[in-house]
Image (cartoon, coloured by chain):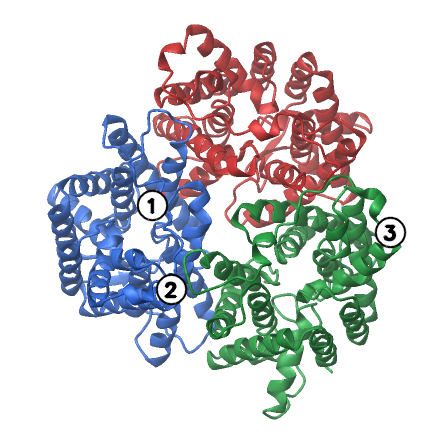
Chain colours: A red, B green, C blue
Amino acid sequence: MALRFSSTGLMVDDKNSLHFPLSFFDCVLRGVGQVMLQNNSYTGLLFLIGIFYNSPLFGAAVVLGTVVSTATAMLLGVDRALVRAGLFGFNGGLVAIALLYFLQPDLLTWACVVFAAACSTIFMAALLNLLKVWNIPALTAPFVFTSLCFFLATARFGRLESTHLLPTAGLPKAVTVEGLVTASTVVEGLFNGIAQVFFQGNVITGVIFAVGLVIGSRLACVTALAGSLTGLLVAWGMGAAEPAIRSGAFGFNSVLVAIAFGAVFFVVDRLSIAYTLLATIAAAVVFASVSAALEPLGVPALTLPFVLVTWMFLLASPIFPGLARRGIS
Amino acid sequence: MALRFSSTGLMVDDKNSLHFPLSFFDCVLRGVGQVMLQNNSYTGLLFLIGIFYNSPLFGAAVVLGTVVSTATAMLLGVDRALVRAGLFGFNGGLVAIALLYFLQPDLLTWACVVFAAACSTIFMAALLNLLKVWNIPALTAPFVFTSLCFFLATARFGRLESTHLLPTAGLPKAVTVEGLVTASTVVEGLFNGIAQVFFQGNVITGVIFAVGLVIGSRLACVTALAGSLTGLLVAWGMGAAEPAIRSGAFGFNSVLVAIAFGAVFFVVDRLSIAYTLLATIAAAVVFASVSAALEPLGVPALTLPFVLVTWMFLLASPIFPGLARRGIS
Amino acid sequence: MALRFSSTGLMVDDKNSLHFPLSFFDCVLRGVGQVMLQNNSYTGLLFLIGIFYNSPLFGAAVVLGTVVSTATAMLLGVDRALVRAGLFGFNGGLVAIALLYFLQPDLLTWACVVFAAACSTIFMAALLNLLKVWNIPALTAPFVFTSLCFFLATARFGRLESTHLLPTAGLPKAVTVEGLVTASTVVEGLFNGIAQVFFQGNVITGVIFAVGLVIGSRLACVTALAGSLTGLLVAWGMGAAEPAIRSGAFGFNSVLVAIAFGAVFFVVDRLSIAYTLLATIAAAVVFASVSAALEPLGVPALTLPFVLVTWMFLLASPIFPGLARRGIS
């Protein structure tokens, strides 16, 4: 299997393509896997199993969104290697699951899912072009901004009805509740933190995701668990509310940051581990900030903290000569 | 008439210049025309007639703003070809009309108009330099940010008094009112959508603007009407409030996006028409989002949705090899 | 003393380094001086004296923050010339003083100071890489965004307690109070405007800072005073509240803009003086806007207006051939 790094810094697989529709099916599964930066169809399959286990509705949504955004990229003639690696799928899949999580699952919402997934492909292409100047990837930014756009639009569009979740997307101010954090908070929070990457508040789903990561890369699984734990401990130490810690709300951005820096972008050594730890802690703090900043608008932070922290730490890395970025030789 | 495309992607006219003050007058008219991306002094003249028809106050404001920003660019020694094409006029004209629309027309406001129009020229130059990395134009971004800056400052500056329009610049949440949309809503909304590009809620002014577009480019006129209709239909379909639809509020950003993609930046073919349609629909959704996001601050969306959608779809276009951008080759 | 301009447009000193720990001490003092764009250790020393005069707590904070961010840059292997010029110190120093100004000075806050100062170094590196495309400096952006991040996070982190100052960081809407501005308002406002660059509302501290500037550059001192006066007069003319004018709130951003354009980035001539004046006025207006925009979130504008106005006017300058930027030959 011939691997190379694309201009976006993400892994691209150049092996001979499968025949249609098997090749398309492979693209979609890799797209699901790329949500946690894994260009691996088996990992994607396990993520899907984890989601369907918790909710067939969300499972169907993530499949539809990934299919639409991948197909849009193909119709618009995007470079095959990028599409095949799933890079035009994962944002569509996440947009779909976000819209169904926060909006009522009626016909109009499904139509919005199709439109939004197509737009996420345009957004991805725009960011590829914008960010190639600094050689940094788009990450989940297309998902974040496309989703926020639709959530905000519900204020003007009378037929878009939100579920009860959107107004409380901002988490409540904590009273000092440190005594209430128990072993079960930590164990549930640890796996919920991984499951929340796909909006799944389900410990078993978190475990299935972890198994999916092991298949893609053992290092990715270890860093994901370490990231979830770090986010949880920072939130606990700073006096966040126990239900928020248990739900994994402070974990999922740290999970993604930990995978990105600990298992994808840098060669592992002492300096990169310290750098990854700093970024992972920062992700938990930035999650608190972004969710507070968006609270007056009644919209959630999604993975915006992951995007901001990863962009910042990647942009900074060329100034620090000791950090060895992978695939740049 | 020798036309070429400047580094900003907007048309620049290289013909021999007229003598002063006729040449300056020509720059100002082209500046007014450039509000709808038309480098044509007759189009600019008809836009002015349309504005004066509705309100001599706004007509005087747009002339003053365009004159000040164009003169500032000349004093600072900006490349003549850019100034002659009206590229340093249209943001000043729009800033002036926006300040007089939302602030009381007293002496201090007129002083602010002069200062703000001069600042719009600095802003335009900054964006020319910033965006040349990706070869995309500044559009009306200098107008949007300069205007928002002054509207927000009214909260601190006791002598800047807003008209009654600013606090209600965010449109009310719609109840489902689809039954109330009639043929008159559609016809008025269609032309108001064009008139609102200059803050004019007047059907006749919209018709005069459409005639001005025909003079510049028949294609621009057709796409403008199609854009206004698309924005209106999206808003209707999503359950927006009837008065907002009738006022053209959901139209003017789609009008500008439709002109940009349908008549200026791309060669017209099947793919570019589909791309333009997608962008025009997106502009209506983004208008709903941006106006909702700015509502807590009591400031309007202006043409920010047009700017954001056009930048995104232009940035994305080089990734899609089937889309043929004009004037590059 | 061999001076050159670095790629960031800020002065870099290439003279032979002193021996550790004297050289480190020198870096820290230069870092304090760089808050007002002065690469001069004596200027930094006088700034420290001014701060300690007003508050030993803030003095200790600025030393700790500058030490941590400078040391982090050294550990990560940043180019020595940049560190030696204090460019990796000033944001850490400002972050530290901001956190102690707005948060209770308990152990957790001091831990946050250390973490935030380290993060400001990563942020500085990220902006160096991001902005080198346009050859513009990072200024105090790392300080602004790192600080805002922690202030916003207090809403989620029960153990981060704010002082009484944070909720009123947005200044009250002025009633027209022009009659109340007296000579003492102007004199106090003038020096408070300089002192507020370091959050010090103290006239004597402002005078000590001015003396520090004279040591670094007489021109910097003159432009700083002119900038403070301009900001004050704009606020007065626009009807800002007298206590806000007296406190220097409308001055400190204009002070920094005036130093940057009047004494650092451009060769002084008639055109650059006019350009500097325009930028200085704009800074006062943008301060009013930004503080109003951030009021719903209960966080202060800090030096964000300085950063935005300086970036804009620097980005625009290459389009205006009459403006001669220093150090580019």
Residue type at tag 1: Phe
Label 3 sits on residue: B182
In this rendered view, identify the residue nearer to me: A47 or C254. C254
Assess disc 3: are there few (<14), some (14-19) or many (≥20) residues with their C-alpha within 10 Å of its C-alpha.
few
Q: How many marks?
A: 3
| Residue A218, placed above or below residue A134 | above
Measure the alpha-carbon separation of dots 3 and 1. 55 Å
In this view, which residue lies farthest toward the bottom? B19
Tags 2 and 3 in contact by the CB under 8 Å rule?
A: no
The C terminus of chain B appears in which quarter of the rendering? bottom right
Label 2 sits on residue: C239
B205 with respect to C260 (left or right): right
In this view, which residue lies farthest toward the top? A183
Assess disc 2: are there few (<14), some (14-19) or many (≥20) residues with their C-alpha within 10 Å of its C-alpha.
many
Residue type at tag 3: Thr
Q: Are marks 3 and 1 on the same chain?
A: no
Local secondary structure at mark 2? loop
Residue type at tag 2: Gly
